[in-house]
Image (cartoon, helix red, strand yellow):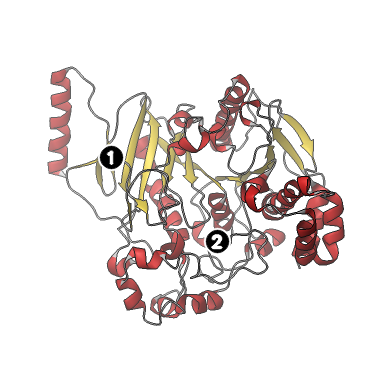
């Protein structure tokens, strides 16, 4: 470290001589990092674990190796390997991808600010912390330290195999992506104080597969003590494959794990959608892999854990969007009214009549909307309600929301993921430029949500001056805060329809 101190002093001296601010440098447990200057300091591409390459493929993350000198942390690390059609950040992909990013206010580096750690979505087959939408500067400007990180996805993150289970001292395989998430949270606990964060006030937040990950971590003993709050935006709670069925599916790719470790990432990606056990009666036309009930990271089915309240006790916010299912309905393949009825009868059995009554499609013109509404209820609204009920059972403050704002007043209800520009304050991300530009209502709502998320991370209470008093969740009445053009308190969101869907799907 003596060489590192010399380099730090040299950098500071050169900056002073030039009359400019010294570049921000922070010492982590593995070595010093230099980030980007400004009102919000940004540190990108910091390794939180060793590269999971070679013999490290399909093994739990190992500690990041130490380095000497000062590591450049002004650029994002590689995206984790994924199919080319998924990547949207412009970063190269690699198995050497276990890095994280930190945004923190430049002033008051010893302020012990609340910490927000983001987990990206992407159906467990895609995603990146380098996506422009997830830039944490605007959130950090509200008085928080914001962290994002990459985790392994798809076949490289969730392959189970008999030989992998046999070589594991825990006799488990398949949940390497979740183990990456746990390793990143451990890094935060060990290092975030150096960036101005308070390791005793860490809130993890995520959307879609990121929210599902958090929902599952809340059932895992390995995540105990790593965060004090959780914000789950549009979670799902699928029935997980068990270890034995996941091993059988993985073994179909080849009996010898050494040969699979020798395969190229491109060869493995060819199996990115067929290495996993087929979903049981999937509702949506696409079926993605997911974590598995492996007996180690996830010792039980998540829905069962939520039903029994067998969860980590943390303060939580959980919610969904007004029209979640619309994202998953291709207009070119929208069902006719007859096809929609047949689909409902196939999946919901005796409850199909109620599902169809509550979500009618008297003509082909409205069948796609009814189909999307049922998809949203079954996959997202039901899961958000189950999470809220389970967490509230733990006697910790739990809050629910429904995001209804139509961006730019377009009149089209918010679908899956469309709360994210408001949460991050980033309306210029490429995927959202096709929407109407934000108006004054969007910017007010965005400011309120950012303030709320940060205040929640600081105190466990999401109510801020720009929002109504947020009611604590109670299973008897299902209260929630509607986050729309005019935020308001309501109750029982789509309750009858969700009840009907659950009668048809759940044992």
| Percent position of residue 212, x then y | 58, 54
Q: Quadrant of residue 480?
A: top right
User: Looking at the rendering, in which quadrant would you find the C terminus?
Assistant: bottom right
Image mark for residue 73: 1
Q: Which residue is tagged 2?
A: 288
Which class describes the residues within 10 Å of circle 2: few (<14), some (14-19), or many (20+)? some
The count of marks equals 2
Inspect this view and state whether residue 166 appears: yes
Residue furthest to the top in view is: 19
Q: Is residue 422 above or below residue 311?
A: above
State the residue at coordinates (87%, 52%): 357
Pick whichever of labels 2 and 1 is earlier in the sequence.
1
Foreground residue, 120 or 455? 120
Q: Quadrant of residue 311?
A: bottom right
Whether residue 105 is situated above or below residue 203 in the rendered picture: above
Front in this rendered view, residue 209 or 390 = 209
Above or below, 486 against 193 in this view is above
Tell me the element at label 2. Answer: loop
Residue 10 left/right relative to 424: left
Tell me if residue 397 can be seen: no
x, y percent for residue 211: 57, 50
355 left or right of 373? right
Q: Residue at x 52, y 35 (%)?
A: 432
Callout 1 crowding tier (Cα within 10 Å): few <14, some 14–19, many ≥20: many
- Tell me the quadrant of the picture where the N terminus can be found: top left
């Amino acid at each position: 470290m003596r060489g590192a101190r010399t380099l730090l002093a040299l950098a500071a001296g050169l900056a002073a001589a030039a009359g400019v601010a010294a570049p921000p440098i922070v010492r982590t447990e593995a070595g010093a990092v230099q980030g980007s200057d400004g009102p919000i300091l940004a540190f990108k591409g910091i390794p939180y674990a060793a590269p999971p390459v070679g013999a490290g493929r399909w093994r739990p993350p190992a500690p990041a190796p130490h380095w000497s000198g000062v590591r450049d942390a002004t650029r994002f690390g590689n995206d984790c390997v994924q199919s080319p059609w998924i990547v949207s950040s412009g970063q190269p992909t690699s198995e050497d991808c276990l890095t994280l990013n930190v945004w923190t206010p430049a002033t008051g580096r010893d302020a012990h600010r609340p910490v927000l750690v983001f987990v990206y979505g992407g159906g467990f087959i895609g995603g990146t912390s380098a996506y422009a939408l997830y830039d944490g500067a605007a959130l950090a400007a509200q008085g928080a330290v914001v962290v994002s990180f990459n985790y392994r996805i798809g076949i490289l993150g969730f392959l189970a195999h008999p030989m992998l289970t046999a070589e594991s001292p825990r006799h488990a395989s398949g949940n390497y992506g979740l183990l990456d998430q746990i390793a990143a949270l451990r890094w935060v606990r060990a290092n975030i104080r150096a960036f101005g964060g308070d390791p005793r006030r860490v809130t993890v937040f995520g959307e879609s597969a990121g929210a599902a990950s958090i929902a599952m971590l809340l059932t895992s003993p390995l995540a105990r003590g790593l965060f004090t709050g959780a914000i789950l935006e549009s979670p799902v709670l699928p029935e997980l494959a068990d270890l034995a069925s996941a091993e059988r599916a993985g073994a179909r790719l080849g009996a010898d794990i050494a040969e699979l470790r020798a395969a190229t990432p491109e060869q493995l990606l060819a199996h990115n959608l067929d290495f996993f056990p087929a979903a049981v009666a999937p509702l949506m036309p696409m079926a993605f892999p997911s974590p598995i009930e492996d007996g180690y990271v996830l010792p039980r089915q998540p829905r069962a854990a939520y039903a029994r309240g067998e969860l980590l006790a943390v303060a939580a916010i959980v919610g969904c969007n007004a029209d979640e299912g619309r994202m998953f309905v291709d207009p070119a393949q929208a069902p006719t009214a007859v096809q929609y009825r047949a689909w409902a009868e196939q999946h919901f059995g005796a409850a199909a009549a109620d599902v169809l009554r509550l979500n009618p499609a008297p003509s082909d013109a409205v069948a796609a909307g009814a189909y999307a509404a049922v998809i949203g209820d079954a996959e997202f609204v039901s899961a958000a309600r189950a999470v809220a009920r389970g967490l509230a059972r733990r006697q910790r403050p739990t809050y629910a929301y429904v995001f209804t704002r139509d961006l730019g007043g377009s009149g089209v209800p918010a679908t899956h993921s469309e709360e994210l520009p408001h949460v991050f304050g980033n309306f210029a991300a490429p995927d959202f430029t096709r929407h109407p530009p934000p108006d004054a209502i969007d910017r007010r709502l965005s400011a309120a949500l950012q303030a709320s998320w940060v205040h929640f991370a600081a105190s466990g209470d999401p109510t801020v001056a720009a929002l109504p008093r947020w009611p604590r969740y109670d299973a008897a009445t299902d209260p929630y805060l509607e986050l729309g053009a005019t935020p308001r308190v309501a109750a029982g969101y789509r309750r009858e329809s969700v009840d009907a869907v659950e009668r048809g799907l759940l044992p």
